[in-house]
Image (cartoon, helix red, strand yellow):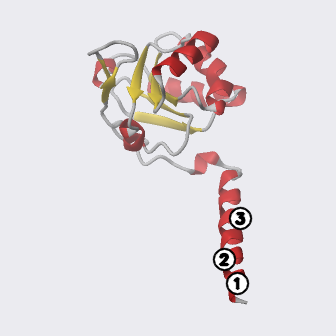
Amino acid sequence: MMRFVPLIAFTALALALWVGLYRDDRDSLRSTFLDEPAPAFSVPKFKAEGETVSLEGFKGGGPVVLNFWASWCGPCIVEHPEITKLSKLDGVRVIGMNYKDKTADAQRFLDRYGNPFAAIGVDERGRAAIDYGVAALPETFVLSGEGRVIYKHTGPIGPGDYDEKLLPAIEAAR
């Protein structure tokens, strides 16, 4: 009987992870930052030696969309057309936060799919992602011009999410 204990424990763990992976309501994972000031960050700017990207540099304007992405992230490819659409909205600034990626790989991603970002920060060690409570890529935050978190989107943005969730959040951020 004792020899089956590890098998039972593994099966229980696998079942719990499977249920969590396929949960129906991603939005039930409410961000602790909603309606709060966004965590400050200052990270190296992508391919710009000595320059930084910071939240402070984007305060005082219109809404900011902060998108955590990486070249190795399949869902990031899926959502990229929606991020591109967001970048074309009047008064909206889209900041990309490249997460634990190689510069050459990130550049190939941007060359292939386009660069919709007003600025790209490099989160080499994942510190900014930790500060924002990012669990898995992609994750996207809508921030007001004053730097408050209005909305957090977990997972890839789909066409329905764009219309039903992101656009209303951006309007609320205005």
The image position of residue 35, as x and y in percent, is 40, 40
The image position of residue 21, as x and y in percent, is 67, 52
| Amino acid marked by disc 3 | Leu
Checking the image for residue 147, the label placed there is none
Residue 83 visible in the shown view? yes
| Amino acid marked by disc 1 | Arg
Foreground mark, 2 or 3? 2
Q: Is residue 97 above or below residue 113?
A: below
Residue lying farthest front?
Answer: 3
Q: Label 2, label 3: how many angstroms apart (C-alpha)?
A: 14 Å
Verify CB contact (< 8 Å) between mark 1 and mark 3. Answer: no
Residue shown at 56% from the left, 34% from the top? 138
Residue shown at 71% from the left, 64% from the top? 15
Q: Is residue 127 above or below residue 82?
A: below
The image position of residue 121, as x and y in percent, is 39, 23
Q: Label 1, label 3: how many angstroms apart (C-alpha)?
A: 20 Å
Residue with the mark numbered 1 = 3
The answer to which of 124 and 83 lies nearer the viewer is 124
Checking the image for residue 15, the label placed there is 3
Verify CB contact (< 8 Å) between mark 1 and mark 2. Answer: yes
The answer to which of 14 and 42 lies nearer the viewer is 14
Residue 35 visible in the shown view? no
Q: Image check: 116 left or right of 22?
A: left
Residue lying farthest bottom?
Answer: 1
Disc with the residue nearer the chain's start (2 vs 3): 2
Pick the quarter of the image with the C terminus: top left
Numbered disc 3: secondary structure: helix
Q: Residues within 10 Å of mark 3 (few under 14, many from 20)?
A: few
Residue with the mark numbered 2 = 6
